[in-house]
Structure formats: structure tokens, C-alpha cells
Amino acid sequence: MKYSPALVFILSLLGAVYIQAEEVLPPQFNFDRYSKMVEHSPFAIATAVAPPAATPDFAKDLYIANAARSPEGDMVTLASTSDHNFKKYLTTREPVDGYSIANIEWSDKVGATKVTISKDGNFATLTFNQALLSQSAPNAGVASRSFAPPMPGPASVPNPVSQKLPAALPAEVQQLIPSR
């Protein structure tokens, strides 16, 4: 029993601390309090964007082959990936076989110009055929370079390096060295 007053004191002290701790801690809120913040969170996963409208059937295989500006009106050449004989030369002045130019978005970048055409009330935005642009780019670089034919060296001038080489070289190495 000699420990009982000390035990009673410790238990009463712990009880007082526990009661004060309940008063210090804020009450726990329901999750509904945070639902508005979760709905408008900048860190939420973005919803999928609807895919762009499909190109109308009349322009399914069409692409822009050429586009040019002129004082008389802009001109665009339409071509088809499936029918290589299909070519329409459109101008901003008048329609051709039902095709007309509705809008041209000019760009300084090669192949970035976009043309909106219309036929029978249907509109489609066309671009250049990127596959053809990437094929023509390497060929254009080769055609623009000029290659100089190799210049033969003078035959009468001896090669000073070959005179300093040792005489006992293997036959394979001697074939690589110009004649002495």
C-alpha cells in the first residue's frame, strides 16, 4: 500500500493530461468538407479531350501539293494519295468542279500552310503531305551540293614521307603507300 499514493498521483496526472489533450486537438471533420476542393483541384487528372472531327469523305485522300500567292488571287493545287491522276488547281477567285478555297492559313515554315476547302457545303482543312515533304528534303540537299572532281597530284614530285619509311615493310603496307 505504500505505492498507492504515488500510483494515484500518477494516474490522476495522466487523466488530467488526457482531458487537456482532448481540448487542444481540433475536432475531426467529415470528408464532405473537402469535396469542393477535390472537384476543383489543379492537380486532378485531366479528362480526355474529344478527338478532332474526322475529315469529310470528299477530302479523305486529298492533300495540298502546292500553294502560291499572287496579285490575281491565291492558288492551291490539290492532289490525292489514292488517285495519282487527280489534280485540281484552285484559286480564290472561282470554284473548280465544285471545289473552292474557303480559307488559307499561310506559314513561313515549309509544309505548315493549311488550306480549308469546301465542296457541296462540306468543309475540310488540308495540309501538305508530310511523307512527300520528308522524301524530297534529302534529294534537294544532294542536288544543291556541287561535287568537285578529285584532283590528281603531280606525278613527278616524290613523296617525302615514303622516303623516310623503313625498307622492310610487309607487302600489304607497301601497296597502300604511293609508288616511290
Image: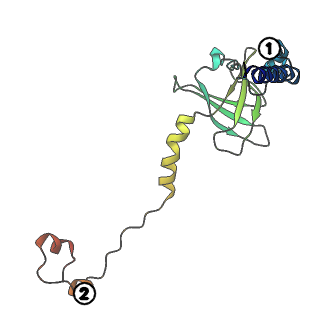
Q: Residue at x 26, y 84 (%)?
A: 161
- Mark 1 Cα within 10 Å, few/some/many (few <14, many 20+)? few
Q: Which residue is mark 2?
A: 158
Residue 131 locus on image (x, y percent): 53, 35
Q: Say which of 16 and 138 sits in front.
A: 16
Rounded to the nearest angstrom, the CA distance separating label 1 from label 2 is: 94 Å
Which quadrant would residue 55 be assigned to in this image?
top right
Coloured how? rainbow
Most distant residue in the front direction: 2
Callout 1 amino acid: Phe
Q: Which mark is residue 142?
A: none
Image position of 74 (left or right of 58): right
Res 40 seen here: no
| Residue 12, placed above or below residue 136 | above
Callout 2 secondary element: loop
Q: Say which of 101 and 20 sits in front.
A: 20
Q: Say which of 63 and 1 sits in front.
A: 1
Which quadrant would residue 47 be assigned to in this image?
top right
Which quadrant would residue 149 be assigned to in this image?
bottom left
Q: Which residue is mark 1?
A: 31
Mark 1 or 2 closer to N-term? Answer: 1
